[in-house]
Amino acid sequence: MNRRTRLRRTGILCLQAIRNAAYFRAWNAAPISRRRQQFWISLNGNFVDMAILDWCKLFGDVRAIHHWSKSITDSHAFLEGLHHSIHMDAAEFELYRLELRAYRDKYVAHLDELNFFTVPDLQPAIHSTRHLYQYMVDFEDDVGAFIEAPRSAFVFYQEHLRLGRAAHSESRAP
């Protein structure tokens, strides 16, 4: 895979994870009556599952085709900024990575014999994914991979959070 294609695909995964996390977060704006309806419960569950699935493609396994390390030329600089951005050191991030992988493996991908699984805190996933995307746009795009892509991961997240909230407030009918 050439560098431009790799950056673009990694960027697409970042944006998908960011968008789905924003839509999941927008659920909090939904009326209580909507949060009791199975359609909306399932929809929101799919948003979080896809956000975590895509995050794991980016951060979950160094052997994965779209792992961040395959797109970043200065791993040290990237990791230093990442840990600062998410307010976690390397050990804390590793524990978080394992938590999200467990959710993906035990609940999303295989549905092991679990009676209950708590959705992990998405804040570090959102921050780490935004950091990766922004780092690629700002420091790695020497091949024009992001010419037509959003320039700001933060603005992209905020826009989709707004769209998700608006969708929940548009139709309040049960």
Image: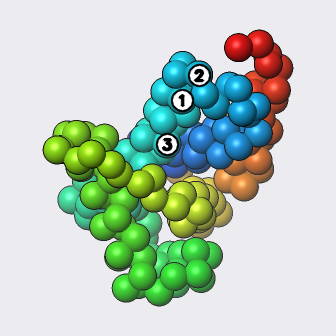
Residue with the most extreme left position: 113
Instruction: Residue at 67% x, 53% y: name it.
Output: 153
Q: Which of marks 2 and 1 is in front?
A: 2
Percent coordinates x, y for residue 130 in the rendering: 60, 58
The kind of residue on which mark 2 rests is Gln
Q: Is mark 1 on a helix, strand or loop?
A: helix
Tag 2: Cα neighbours inside 10 Å, few (<14), some, or many (≥20)?
few
Q: Do the residues labelled 2 and 1 touch (CB within 8 Å)?
A: yes
- Residue 138, horizontal then vertical, whole percent: 65, 63
Q: How far apart are marks 3 and 2 (CA)?
A: 17 Å
Q: Nearer the viewer, residue 162 or 112?
A: 112
Q: Mark 3 points at which residue?
A: 48
- Depth check: give the residue in front, 100 or 154: 100
Alpha carbon distance from label 2 to label 1: 6 Å
- Residue type marked 1: Ile
Q: Of residues 134 and 3, which is closer to you in this image? A: 134
Q: How far apart are marks 3 and 1 (CA)?
A: 11 Å
- Residue that label 2 marks: 37
Residue 139 visible to the viewer: yes
What residue appears at the point 23 percent right and 47 percent down from the top-left corner?
114
Disc number placed over residue 41 in the picture, else none: 1
